[in-house]
């Protein structure tokens, strides 16, 4: 006779969201989503952006040319020209693309250039790209560390010796493992030079969903969907970090985004990947 007071694990429907970060998706009020909110005075005095470009002064619209070369001995021979503010932004975007080579010479420069083009012409619309999804999937699959989110899911499934279906019990175990894991981010050393670190220098929000679970004897296969979102924008903290403040590309980016006379809109960068986990239940 069954004791009705015993609570058996109930089978949950799939797909099922396993984990979502506290940082919200589509957070248009995040600090790095601000644009056109700073005056010239604030940018020059507080953020120390007197010098932004080597070839022209965006504050005055004065362009400098050195007809006899760019070396030190040629610099006294300068031709000065005036450009309008539309040309100022165009020239700054061109310089931003040029300076991107430093952080994207090994791999994904094309992706970063697409993001720069979207900043210039996208008017704040969300961005997604198959190249980014491919890189995100590889990031997740190739993370062999014990603290990866993918490994945490595998551990939770493997340690449930009574695993017969997806239950509230196993969902809770997976959530604990993921909460104690490292979520996928492009923060490896290689990302500093392959264009991914500058394209997505953080992942603001992440959601992990179990799409399918197949159990055959002691073996199991789980299909897991990762959804990530970052903001292609800079906040005050970004700009005040010495490594960003001293790089021309970030000084130009911050000016284009935050100066009240420019105000190019930052945007959401969306990425997703579905990966499979294969494992085996532990013996009782």
Image (cartoon, helix red, strand yellow):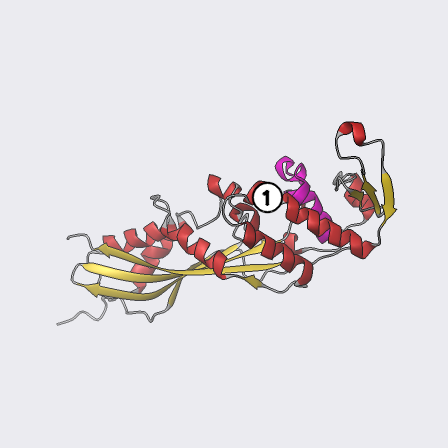
The residue range painted magenta reads: 238-258
For this orientation, the residue located farthest to the front is 68
Question: Dot 1: what SS?
Answer: helix
In which quadrant will I find the N terminus? bottom left
For this orientation, the residue located farthest to the top is 73
Question: Visible in this render: residue 149?
Answer: yes
Residue in the foreground of this view, choosing between 10 and 114: 114
Residue at image location 59% in from the left, 40% down from the top: 102
- Residue 116, position in %: x, y? 63, 54
- Residue 198, position in %: x, y? 57, 47
Query: Dividing the picture into quarters, in which one does residue 272 lie?
Result: bottom left
**On screen, residue 101 above or below 160:** above
Residue 263 falls left or right of residue 234: right
For this orientation, the residue located farthest to the left is 1
Question: Visible in this render: residue 258?
Answer: no
Residue in the foreground of this view, choosing between 123 and 16: 123
Residue at image location 17% in from the left, 59% down from the top: 218
Residue in the foreground of this view, choosing between 242 and 195: 195
Residue in the foreground of this view, choosing between 209 and 103: 103
Q: Which residue is mark 1?
A: 101
Residue at image location 32% in from the left, 69% down from the top: 12
Query: Dividing the picture into quarters, in which one does residue 137 lie?
Result: bottom left
- Residue 171, position in %: x, y? 33, 61
Residue 255 falls left or right of residue 156: right
- Residue 277, position in %: x, y? 30, 57
**On screen, residue 16 above or below 192:** below
| SS majority, magenta | helix
User: What crowding class fits label 1: few (fewer than 14 Cα within 10 Å), some (14-19), or many (20 or more)?
Assistant: some
Q: Per the image, is 275 magenta? A: no
């Amino acid at each position: 006779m069954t004791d009705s007071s015993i609570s058996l694990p109930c089978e949950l429907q799939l797909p099922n969201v396993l984990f979502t970060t506290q940082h919200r998706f589509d957070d248009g009020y995040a600090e790095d989503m601000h644009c056109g909110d700073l005056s010239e005075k604030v940018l020059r005095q507080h953020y120390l952006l007197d010098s932004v470009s080597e070839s022209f002064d965006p504050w005055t619209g004065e362009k400098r040319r050195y007809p006899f070369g760019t070396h030190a001995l040629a610099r006294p021979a300068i031709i000065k020209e005036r450009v309008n503010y539309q040309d100022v932004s165009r020239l700054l975007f061109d310089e931003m693309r040029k300076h991107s080579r430093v952080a994207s010479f090994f791999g994904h420069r094309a992706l970063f250039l697409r993001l720069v083009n979207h900043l210039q012409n996208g008017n704040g619309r969300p961005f997604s790209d198959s190249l980014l999804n491919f890189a995100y999937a590889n990031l997740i699959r190739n993370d062999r560390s014990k603290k990866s989110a993918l490994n945490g899911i595998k551990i939770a499934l493997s340690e449930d010796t009574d695993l017969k279906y997806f239950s509230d019990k196993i969902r809770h175990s997976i959530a604990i493992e993921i909460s104690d894991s490292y979520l996928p981010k492009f923060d490896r050393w290689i990302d500093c030079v392959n264009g991914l670190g500058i394209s997505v220098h953080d992942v603001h929000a992440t959601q992990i969903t179990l799409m399918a679970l197949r159990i055959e004897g002691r073996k199991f296969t789980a299909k897991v969907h990762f959804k990530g979102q970052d903001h292609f924008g800079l906040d005050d903290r970004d700009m005040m970090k010495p490594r960003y403040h001293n790089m021309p590309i970030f000084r130009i980016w911050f000016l284009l985004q935050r100066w009240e006379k420019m105000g190019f809109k930052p945007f959401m960068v969306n990425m997703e990947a579905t990966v499979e986990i294969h494992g085996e239940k532990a013996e009782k």
